[in-house]
Amino acid sequence: MARAALALEDGTVYVGESFGATGTVSGEACFNTSMTGYQEILTDPSYRGQILTMTAPQIGNYGVNEADVESGKLQMAGFVVREASRIASNFTATGTLGDYLARAGVVGLAGIDTRALVRRLRIRGAMTAVLSSEILDAGRLVEMARSAPPLVGRDLVSEVMPEAERGWSEPLDTWAEPLPQPTEGGVMPAVPAFGVEKHVVALDYGMKWNIARHLASTGCRVTVLPGRVSAADVLAHKPDGVFLSNGPGDPEVLTSCVETVRGLVGRVPMFGICLGHQLLALACGAKTFKLKFGHRGANQPVMDLTTGKVEITSQNHGFAVDEESLPAELEVTHRNLNDGTIEGLRHRSAAAASVQYHPEAAAGPHDSSYLFARFRQMLA
């Protein structure tokens, strides 16, 4: 078996088995606690510029297929697992994880103690790293990690953002059925009653495809625009609402995106997820900060402060909104029960709201689907 190595900027080196593509890559070392969904994770544009470790001990056992993707290609720099399954056991599989990574050019590392790696990242924080199946010299790899560009201050959105406008027209799948609309008594009707179709412009900073599916399932016609368009460009489409998507990297370097959002607040109903949540906060005058090791996984508990209910959520972010910097017009609506950070915001006078997590990822599995219904109601 060919060898590969992961070196962290603190001098730690892990040597194991190479799988996937051959090469040498750098990125921020981080981890995800999900037990399933590795294909959706691999194709999530928010992982651009990162080397991801999965905490589940075996990854790849149900293979890969053409349906479980969130973008047009694999996005992350490298992938680290304890054991990479070489057999795809699910009847829907069209290939193995290793072949999938190899075709996409993603370097993989298996056979290391991922518990030790994750513990180090939790104690020391996320670090810049180098993953290589070509170079095994520990000293050289550590020096490469220390000289590689950090994630903070990098504009990664420009690497994943679409180049042109497009309309979302993918047929809805059975697992993206129309979302129910909650009634006053809390009963979820079998058939949604959202009424006439509404036009939503989705500003794409690296949007997961399942978000567009959920917007469409609530009765919205979705037009996807590159995230760097101006507010005037957005308003020229005469949208009933604007959606701000997820995306990778440091939100504070995206000054033109912030200006666009600032120009839209109060002029059209708005809903943001993940990076979109951070951009809305920045546009209103708040600040963001880098989390020690981020929130990545499908088991993050979040409380909706307006109802007192707790949701099990799927998350993928390394930055958060600084609560001390919040302007008076922003109200905290959701809070992470692990570390108390802000997970949702609402504008007090404008029709604008956002959450830091991913309601479309169905971790609960339906705990957070009401958020799309709330946005649809804002468009009525």
Image (spheres, grey):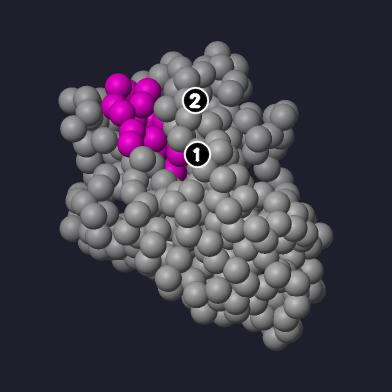
From the top left corner, tell me how far across and down residue 300 is, in percent: 34, 62
The amino acid sitting under disc 2 is Leu
On the question of residue 256 being in view, the answer is yes
- Closest to the observer, 348 or 336: 336
**Comparing labels 2 and 1, the label whose residue is closer to the camera:** 1
Magenta segment? 269-289
Pick the front one: 66 or 256: 256
- In the figure, 361 relative to 346: above or below? below
The residue sitting at 45% across, 22% down in the picture is 258
Indicate the position of residue 179 as horizontal and vertical percent values.
48, 58
Residue under numbered circle 1: 151
Residue occupying image coordinates x 45% and y 66%: 117
Three-letter residue code for mark 1: Leu
- Name the residue that disc number 2 marks: 254
Any part of residue 184 in sight: no
State which quadrant residue 273 falls in.
top left
Residue shown at the point (57%, 39%) measured from the top left: 148
Query: Is residue 283 located in the magenta-colored stretch of the structure?
Result: yes
Placement of the C terminus among the 4 image quadrants: top left
